[in-house]
């Protein structure tokens, strides 16, 4: 049983995760943290410092402005953290790396198992298509209430592509002031906002006479909640270090392979 503290318990993702954990026999939320105290089937405190319950891991879906306090308190309590909050500054990211030398931290801009699996596919695809001269574009679509553009996930996908290309690409967010042909090392990132469009990310590899598209649609927040819970189960009990969702996926694949190889039946 993985005992979880939900940091950002009254937020939309906090409530989604609480609902998912209710039906998960391998996990339990023992306490929550939010600006408003209360009880949601578990006690909710205003500060992680005040939490009395024993726990194995913290899941954080809160705000960038309180991440530093969260990490410092988690370091004091020796609590692993699944860090889902985005929009961190370079200084905060440096703090994450520093504290990860003392406690395990799993950080990802997107907790979806689908997106993180696609990230690995993009690295392989880029090695093939970039060298063949294909143009690469990312288009993301979201509802009209989303504040940031492009999305953190779009940047995460672009970074995976650029890593595979040894940093050769320049990110282009707006071509309205350019009157020139597309440069070969441009990586276009476009953001659309409207209505209640579900989170959608599309990566396009456009070459001579063929087009390859990798498409992901998030129909509900449950995909992020399930990913965060899987990450919490993975992170609990790990050594200090900085982890990401690829570690969770690799662990799942290793577990599945071990189960498949454990069949001792004979003919």
Image (cartoon, grey):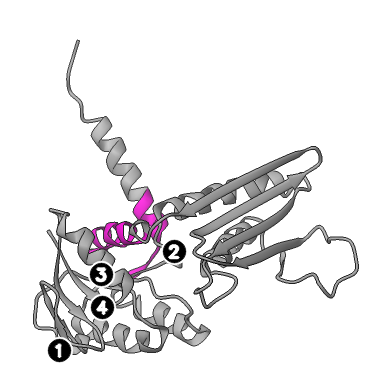
Nearest the viewer among 156 and 202 is 202
Which of pointers 4 and 2 lies earlier in the amino acid sequence?
4
Circles 4 and 2: CB distance less than 8 Å?
no
User: Is residue 233 rendered to the left or right of residue 142?
Assistant: left
Q: Is residue 262 above or below residue 102?
A: above
Q: Is residue 45 left or right of residue 185?
A: left
Between label 4 and label 2, give the one nearer the viewer.
4
In the image, 198 versus 230, the foreground residue is: 198
The residue at the far right in this view is: 180
Q: Which residue is mark 3?
A: 15
Residue at 15% x, 59% y: name it: 22
Which residue position holds label 2? 110
According to the image, label 1 marks what residue?
Answer: 50
Q: Is residue 132 left or right of residue 102?
A: right
Q: In which image quadrant can residue 231 be found?
A: bottom left
Q: Looking at the magenta stretch, what is its main secondary structure? A: helix
Disc 1/disc 2 C-alpha distance (Å): 29 Å
- SS at mark 1? helix
**Which numbered disc covers residue 10?**
4
The residue closer to the viewer here, 35 or 184, is 35
Q: Residues within 10 Å of mark 2 (few under 14, many from 20)?
A: many
**What element does badge 2 sit on?**
loop
Which callout, 4 or 3, points at the residue further toward the start of the chain? 4
């Amino acid at each position: 049983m993985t005992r979880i503290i939900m940091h950002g318990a009254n937020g939309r993702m906090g409530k989604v995760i609480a609902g998912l954990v209710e039906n998960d026999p391998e996990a339990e939320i023992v306490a929550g943290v939010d600006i408003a105290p209360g009880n949601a089937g578990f006690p909710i405190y205003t500060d992680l410092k005040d939490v009395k319950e024993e726990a194995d891991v913290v899941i954080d879906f809160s705000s960038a402005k309180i991440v530093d306090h969260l990490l410092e308190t988690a370091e004091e309590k020796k609590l692993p953290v699944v860090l889902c909050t985005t929009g961190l500054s370079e200084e905060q990211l440096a703090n994450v790396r520093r504290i990860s030398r003392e406690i395990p931290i799993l950080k990802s801009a997107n907790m979806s198992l689908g997106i993180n699996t696609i990230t690995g596919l993009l690295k392989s695809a880029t090695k093939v298509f970039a060298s063949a001269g294909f143009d690469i574009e990312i288009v993301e679509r979201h509802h009209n209430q989303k504040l940031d553009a492009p999305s953190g996930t779009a940047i995460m996908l672009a970074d995976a592509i650029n890593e595979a290309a040894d940093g050769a690409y320049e990110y282009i967010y707006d071509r309205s002031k350019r009157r020139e042909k597309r440069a070969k090392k441009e990586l276009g990132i476009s953001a659309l906002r409207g209505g209640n469009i579900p989170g959608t990310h599309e990566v396009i590899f456009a070459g001579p006479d063929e087009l390859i598209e990798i498409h992901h649609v998030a129909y509900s927040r449950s995909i992020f909640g399930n990913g965060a819970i899987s990450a919490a189960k993975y992170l609990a009990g790990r050594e200090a270090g900085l982890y990401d969702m690829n570690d969770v996926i690799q662990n799942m694949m290793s577990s599945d392979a071990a189960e498949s190889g454990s069949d001792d039946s004979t003919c």
